[in-house]
Structure formats: structure tokens, C-alpha cells
Amino acid sequence: MGYKLLCMGIDIQGCLGYYIHMPANHNIPHTEKSKAKMSASHKGIPLLNKRRLSRTENGVEIFRCSSCHNFYPREGFYKNKRTILGLTSECKKCHILTSIKTRNRENGKRLNRESARRNRAKNPEKFRERELNYSHKREKNEKTKARELLNAAIRSGKIIKPDRCHRCGTIGRVTAHHQNYKKPLEVEWLCYECHGNK
């Protein structure tokens, strides 16, 4: 069977020598019959030699994880409608480890920051009380002593706390970053994002 491609469509030369014209316009909607045919072809027939290994123990069917190769019952896998068995190929533990390895850490940090800002704006008293309780339980060391001396200097007016980050210039809440805790009054005022990247 020969083929002849045209710029406006595709002409297929059949065995009898005539051409069957197939239009190149893919915007034409599919008929219900063609949709059913495509749906049936996409489902396919499962190949037994490629099926996941399984066995039955005490009347319960268990399946092998593709990563750790251990056998677990259905409850040991997450659900996945796109597979034949309706389960993920990895067990829950391996699936979580794979997700942690492949996740975007920077995007996760950004989403956490945005969520914390929204929650703080909704209920600032709750966050203020939580930070106060945490500061009382914090271990007394050189780091906490430097913070206490700095806070005392701010209250007395010796140091004026700015409202702008020294690194990125963002206006808002800033925190003090100590390069050396032995010099408690020498700090760099940074926003939460820049301070977290330190």
C-alpha cells in the first residue's frame, strides 16, 4: 500500500489504485461511534506476562511492590484508577519516599510561607500567643541571651527596628539575624524569606 501526503490533507492510495482523501482538519468533533472505538482501544487487553506478581496468603490476595519487592494487601497501596488493578505500582511507604525525592522543595517553601501569612492575617492573636509560649520554653543559651539583650535595646529606644528588609527591600515584618551572638546589638534586619534562606 502506497501513501501520498498533500499539504491540505492526506491521500491514501489503496490496493485497488484509487485515493481515499482524509482531511487534515482535527477540529471536526468525533462521532459517538468513533469515541466508543477509541475508548475501547485505549483500555486494551492486559498481558498476563506483564501483570504484577501476586499471590494468596490466608485467603487474602497480596501484590508485590515495584520498588521494595515486598508483598502487601490492597490496603498497602494507594488507589489509582489508571491501572488495571486500580492500585499504584509502589506501596504506600515507597510512594511517599518517591514523592519526597521528586517534589519541588522551593515551591513547597513558597506555599508554606503564603499559607502562614494568610493564617496569621486571619488570627494574629493566636500566632502571637504561640510565639510567646515558645519563647518561654526555649532553652537559655548564648543565642537566647543575645535576643533578650536586643529586645531590651529596642524597648529602651537604643535601637530602632526598621520595617524594610536590608537584603531584598521588602516592606513588612522583619527579624534580626545575628552574624555573631557575642555581639548582640549588631544585627541584619531581614524578612522571613531572606532569613530562612540563611
Image: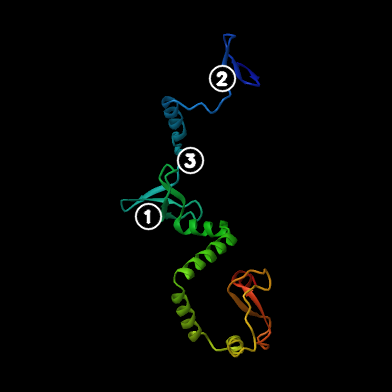
Mark 3 or mark 2: name the one nearer the start of the chain: 2
The quadrant in which residue 164 appears is: bottom right
Q: Secondary structure at mark 1?
A: helix
Q: Nearer the viewer, residue 157 or 179?
A: 157
Q: Closer to us: mark 1 or mark 3?
A: 1
Q: Residues within 10 Å of mark 2 (few under 14, many from 20)?
A: few
For badge 1, the amino acid type reads Glu
Q: On screen, 123 above or below 94? A: below
What label sits on residue 75 in the rendered view?
A: 1
Q: Quadrant of the C terminus?
A: bottom right
Q: Closer to us: mark 3 or mark 2?
A: 2
Q: Residues within 10 Å of mark 3 (few under 14, many from 20)?
A: few
Identify residue for label 3: 50
Mark 2 or mark 1: name the one nearer the start of the chain: 2
Identify residue for label 2: 22
- Image coordinates of residue 58 in percent, x first then y, are 31, 53
| Marker count (numbered) | 3
Q: Residue sitting at 52 percent across and 57 percent down?
A: 99
Mark 1 or mark 3: name the one nearer the start of the chain: 3
**What's the CA distance linking mark 3 and mark 2?**
36 Å
- Image coordinates of residue 132 in percent, x first then y, are 48, 82
- Image coordinates of residue 178 in percent, x first then y, are 65, 81
Q: Residue sitting at 46 percent across and 78 percent down?
A: 130
**What's the CA distance linking mark 2 and mark 1?**
49 Å
Q: Is residue 196 left or right of residue 33?
A: right
Q: Secondary structure at mark 3?
A: helix
For badge 3, the amino acid type reads Lys
